[in-house]
Amino acid sequence: MTASFRFTMSATDGAARTGTVHTPRGDIRTPAFMPVGTAATVKAMMPESVRATGADILLGNTYHLMLRPGAERVARLGGLHRFMNWERPILTDSGGFQVMSLAGLRKLTEEGVRFKSHIDGSVHHLSPESSMEIQRLLGSDIVMCFDECTPHPATEPVAAESMRLSMRWALRSREAFGDRPGHALFGIQQGSVFRDLREESAEKLRAIGFEGYAIGGLAVGEGQEAMFGVLDYAPGMLPEDRPRYLMGVGKPDDIVGAVQRGVDMFDCVLPSRSGRTGQALTRFGAVNIKNARHLDDPRPLDPECSCPACSQYSRAYLHHVFKAGEILSSMLLTWHNLHYYQELMQGLRDAISAGTLEDFARAFHARRAEGDVEPL
Amino acid sequence: MTASFRFTMSATDGAARTGTVHTPRGDIRTPAFMPVGTAATVKAMMPESVRATGADILLGNTYHLMLRPGAERVARLGGLHRFMNWERPILTDSGGFQVMSLAGLRKLTEEGVRFKSHIDGSVHHLSPESSMEIQRLLGSDIVMCFDECTPHPATEPVAAESMRLSMRWALRSREAFGDRPGHALFGIQQGSVFRDLREESAEKLRAIGFEGYAIGGLAVGEGQEAMFGVLDYAPGMLPEDRPRYLMGVGKPDDIVGAVQRGVDMFDCVLPSRSGRTGQALTRFGAVNIKNARHLDDPRPLDPECSCPACSQYSRAYLHHVFKAGEILSSMLLTWHNLHYYQELMQGLRDAISAGTLEDFARAFHARRAEGDVEPL
C-alpha cells in the first residue's frame, strides 16, 4: 500500500484525456464511471459483482450514511470499506446536494445547513467542518468539499452569491480536511451557466489547491445542450494535471460528450435506478423490458453483451421476472446497466489511447440512431 | 445424459436413509432439500448462487407458471430449465395445493378444479390430465400427481372422501403422464392424521406404481407433534426402494425429525421467505436481524458459516441494509438461509452414512437450546 494519491495521464485526444488516479486502495482508470452506493450498498448488487462489471471506485452519500447507520457507527465498525465489503476506493459526496434539496426542511446560513432527517425528522447540522469530519469517519478516499449546488435556473447575481458562498466553504473544507496522506480532497466549481462565474470559481479553487476538481451545478435540469455549452469551457479552467469530475452525470450520451470535452470522472444513479424500474441501457439506446413485445422474445437483451443478464437469459425471461415483481429483475438489469456503463468507459479509454475518439463517438451515436434490434 | 430415473440407497440408520436419485439432468443427493422457485426464480438469488449453496434440485409451482408466463410460452422458449437458467433437475408440484387454497375462487368436481387467476381474474381449469400436460410443457423432471391436499382439521369421513378422490386422480395422472423415459411421476399419499386412511392411500398408490412417493396433507397447521405422529408410520407404508418426499416441510427441526422417520426429500419456502423478512435461520435457531441489539455488533451472523453473508459482513451491516430496505438484505439473508439448509442436509447425509444420526440430532437440538451467541 503506497501512501500517495496522484493522477497520471497516459494519452489525450482533443480535449479528452485517459489516465489513472492512483490511490492506496487501488487504481482508478479514467475516464471512470463510479456506481452509486448511497446507503453502503449499490442497490441489488453484491460488491463482487459491481467489481466484476469493471468498476474501480464507488460513490457513497454522506447525507444518507450520517443519518443511517451514522458515521461514528461506521467508524467503530472499521470504516465504510470494511462495513460494505468494498476494499477499493470510495468517493463520498459532502451531503450538500442532498440537504439543499430538502426544501422546507433546512435552513442555510454562512455557517452551514441545519436540516431535518427524512427518516425520523431529527435535526442535524452540516458545515464544511462537520462534512469533513463525517467523511473522515467514513474513511472515504476521495472527499468532496461541502458546497451549495446552485439550483437551475438562477439569475447571475443569485448564482454569483451562491458560488462565492461555496468558495468560502471550499477554503474552510480545505482547512478542516487537514493533512491526510493517501486521501484526496476535491474542490467543486460552481457558477451555473455563467462563464465569468465559472472562471471566478476556478480561480478561487486553484488558489486554494485541491487534489482534484469537480464541475458542480450541472445535470440539474438545464438540459444537455446547456450542459455541453458549459463543458465547452469549464474543464479547461481547471488544472490540467488533476482529475476532473462531473458530478451526477449521466446518460450514456452525456458521458461521451463530457469525455470529449475533457472530463475524467462521473457518477450517476441512472444505471442502477433504471435497472430497478425495468429499463435496460444498451448500445442501441434504452430498452423497456416491461414492454409486451418482449413476452415471447427468445433473444438476449444485447447479443454482444457478456453480462449475466444478456449471456444467460432471454428478453422473455427478463420481461417475466419484471412483471412478476421478482427481485431477480432488479438484480439482472442493474448488473447489465452497470456492465454496459463500464464497457462504455473502457471503449472511451481505448479510443482516447488510440487517438480515435471521434470515430468512437460517431459509431456510438450511429448505433443508437439505428435503435433496438429488429422485431422478431 | 442417461435416460434413466432411479433411486439408489447407500446407507440407512434406523428408519433414516441416504442415497441418490439419479436423473438425466444430474444426481440428487438424499436426504435433499429443494429450494422453491415459484415463478421461475428462487427469489433474490441467481441460480448459480442457489447451486453454490449445494442445491441439487429446485421446485417450481405449476399454478404460478401456468398463469404467468404460461406453460405453452415456457415450452416455446425451450422449457423451464432453459428459461430460468437452471440445468439441473426440477420438480414441479401439480398446482392442486395452490388452487385448493383459492377459497371462493374455485369449484371442485370429480373432473378437476375450475378457478380464477389471482393475477387477472381469468378463469382456468386444472385436472389430472391438464396438470400432466402443463408439467410436461414446463419440462419438469419430477412431476407430481394432481391431488387434493386435505385441509386440517378434517373429520375421518371427509378425509376419506378427499383421499379417495386424490387416489382416483392419481390413477388418471399416471395414465395421462404416459411413457416419458428419464422423467418421473410421484404419487401423493393422503389420509390426514388417520392411520387407516394413510394405509388405504399407500395401498392404492402402490397398486398404481410410481417412481417416487410423496407424503401430502401435512404441514397444514396440525403442528409438529401430530406431523411426527403420522411420520412414525406413514413412510414405512411406502415402497422402500423409492424416494419419499414430504411436501412443504419445513423448519430445520421438522426436517431432522422427518429424516429420522425415513423421509428423503423436502421443499419449503421458509428459508427464502424468512430471508426477505429479516429472519436468519442458523444452527443456534432463528435470529431476527432487525432487532436493535445487532446495531453495533461487528460479529458475523454465524462465525462458523461460510456463506457470503457470514464470511463478508457484520451483523451490524446486515441490520443496516435490512432497516434501509435494501435489496441486498434479501439477497444476503436468503443466501445464508439456503446455505444453512443445504449444510444441514449434508450433515444429515453424513451422519446417516456414518451411522451416527442419533448423535447428530442430539447435537443439533442441544445447540439450538443454547440459543444465539452471547451478547457482546
Image (cartoon, coloured by chain):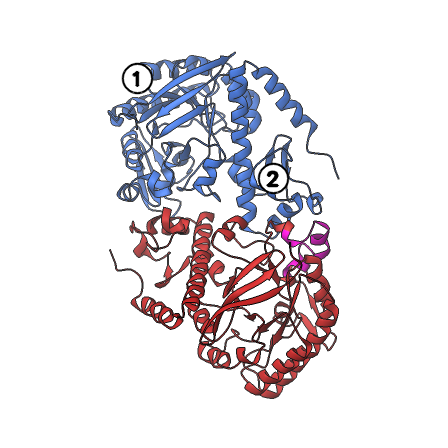
Chain colours: A red, B blue
Secondary structure character of the magenta stretch overall: helix
Q: Is residue A350 magenta?
A: no
**Image quadrant where residue B170 sits:** top left
- Mark 2, residue position: B310
Q: Is residue A80 magenta?
A: yes
- Mark 1, residue position: B208
Q: Which residue occupies 36% across, 13% down?
A: B203
- Camera sees residue B177: yes
Magenta range is A64-81
- Camera sees residue A124: no
* Along the line of sight, the residue nearer the viewer: A149 or B61: A149
Q: Is residue B120 left or right of residue B12?
A: left
* Along the line of sight, the residue nearer the viewer: A91 or A207: A207
Q: Which residue occupies 60% across, 38% down?
A: B280
Whole-percent x, y for residue B258 in the image: 52, 21
Whole-percent x, y for residue B24 in the image: 32, 28
Q: Are marks 2 and 1 on the same chain?
A: yes
Query: Which image quarter is the C terminus of chain B in?
Result: top right
**Disc with the residue nearer the chain's start (2 vs 1):** 1
Badge 1, how many Cα within 10 Å: few under 14, some, many 20+? some
**Image quadrant where residue A66 sits:** bottom right
Q: Which residue occupies 33% across, 68% down?
A: A363
Circle 1: element type = helix
